[in-house]
Image (cartoon, helix red, strand yellow):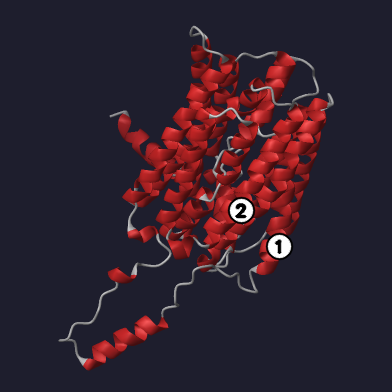
Amino acid sequence: MALVPALPLLSRLSTELGLRSIHHSPRDTKLLCLQRFVRLFAFGLSTLILVLHLSSLGISDARIGLFMTLTLLGDVASTSCLTLFADGLGRRKTLMLAAALMAASGAVFALSGSYWALVAASVLGIMSPSGAEIGPFRAVEESTLAHLTPSHLRSDIFTWYTLTGKAGTALGTLACGWAAQALQQREAWTPTHAHRALFGAYALLGLLNVFLPLLLSAACEASPPRSARSQPSEASSSETTALLSAAEESKPAPTRAAVLSNSSRPLVLRLSALFAIEAFASGLVPASWIAYFFTSTYGLAPSALGLLFSLTALISTLSILLAAPLARRIGLVRTMVFTHLPSAIFLALIPLPDNVALSVLFLVLRSCTQSMDQAPREAFLSAVVLPAERTAVMGVLGVVKTLSQSVAPSVTGGLAQGGRFWVSFVVAGALKAGYDLGVLGMFVGWRGREDGGGDGG
């Protein structure tokens, strides 16, 4: 009988955490979350070792920074092309093509030690320098999720979409640390051998992501395929035929590339300016550079790095669950700002103590709110962007972010080689704080455009 009073509490908790929403979501929504988990597991698997692998090949810090810059510039080209044409080409085909590029990059890293071959694989394929999303995946998937989900449930769905990705990163990072340590302990295995084995696993996970979109239904596409449209039979009356023909003619013709409306362009310019600042800051200190900082400064072993980064990823994952209920109470924009701002401050503090315990403490404190802004931000973007333009707008914003981010690793590489690694952390934290204040000033009180939706503030 003691369980009876607890049932309403459990029901309310399920609603607050979005469990009810994700449980009742379409099968396609769950498959998209699974795809993201597999992909982010692969990105997490490569994050800790990317810079360490290049360093083990005798590549200088400055050339490593150049490598990461060129990688991100290559991502600009692939993301802009694939996202602008995704709705015309087909969202499922776009996801499959991007996953194939990801698998190809992993294969080259597993087989080659040539600097320029690795650069080519990263520029032409998909290799995440930071462990975060790269390529067209996120823009296409977020647009699809918004398409599949009613506006009042999007915050819950994006919370679980973000959470599954963070869980994949956490587990991938943990697996990377322990696998790298175990492989290096084998006889005649150098760090380079261990890294190549892990990049081979990255390629296999990319292949798995090639096949997962085959399980998605046609409901994920921007418009139903022509073959799915019903044709009037010869027995149909002339009136019915005329009505059907008129309905067909009233449907907009599918375009191969999306074009933004005049009303959307000022909004996209504002968002682009803010996201460019935040992305440049993120590019200064991606996870791979932070891992390199802890290794070069404090001499942490791969297993310790894996444990540390999986712990921070786990904390970050669990904190995401609090984002949806908080957004329902204070609004999407305030949730974005008030959770992201503390993480920016802790980021700036990481290199200052010159003490491993304090640096680790600041890294962990940063992770407590680092990702709580992501799901509200995705829900906010889905609300303020016209439905027909979502994939294109998210693709444009992704390109802007990647372009801004691409410049930063070379700056960090130069600072690291000159013994001023700490500057990149401080500048990144300050820029992120400026981004937060800019978002609050420009968008608090902004309302959705789709259906006169609620206050974004």
Instruction: Compare marks 1 and 2 and give the one earlier in the sequence.
Output: 2
**Around disc 1, counting alpha carbons within 10 Å, would you say few (fewer than 14), some (14 to 19), or many (20 or more)?**
few
Residue type for callout 1 = Leu
Tell me which corner region of the image, top left, top right, bottom left or bottom right, holds residue 315. Answer: top right
Q: Determine contact: label 1, label 2, CB under 8 Å.
A: no
- Residue at x 36%, y 44% (from the top left corner): 211
- Residue at x 80%, y 26% (from the top left corner): 417
Residues 284 and 240: in front is 284
Residue 318 appears anywhere in the view: no
- Residue at x 64%, y 32% (from the top left corner): 115
Above or below, 349 against 281 in this view is above
Number of marks:
2
Left or right of 213 in this view: 329:
right
Q: Position of residue 112 (x, y in %)?
A: 55, 29
Q: Secondary structure at mark 2?
A: helix
The C terminus - image quarter: bottom right
Residues 223 and 210: in front is 210
- The residue that mark 1 highlights is 269
Q: Secondary structure at mark 1?
A: helix
Above or below, 331 against 284 in this view is below
- The residue that mark 2 highlights is 77
Residue placed furthest toward the top: 187
- Residue at x 58%, y 35% (from the top left corner): 131
Q: Position of residue 359 (x, y in %)?
A: 72, 20
Q: Position of residue 193 (x, y in %)?
A: 53, 19
Residue placed furthest toward the bottom: 238
Left or right of 236 in this view: 403:
right
The mark found on residue 410 in the picture is none
Q: Position of residue 247 (x, y in %)?
A: 35, 83
Residue 405 appears anywhere in the view: yes
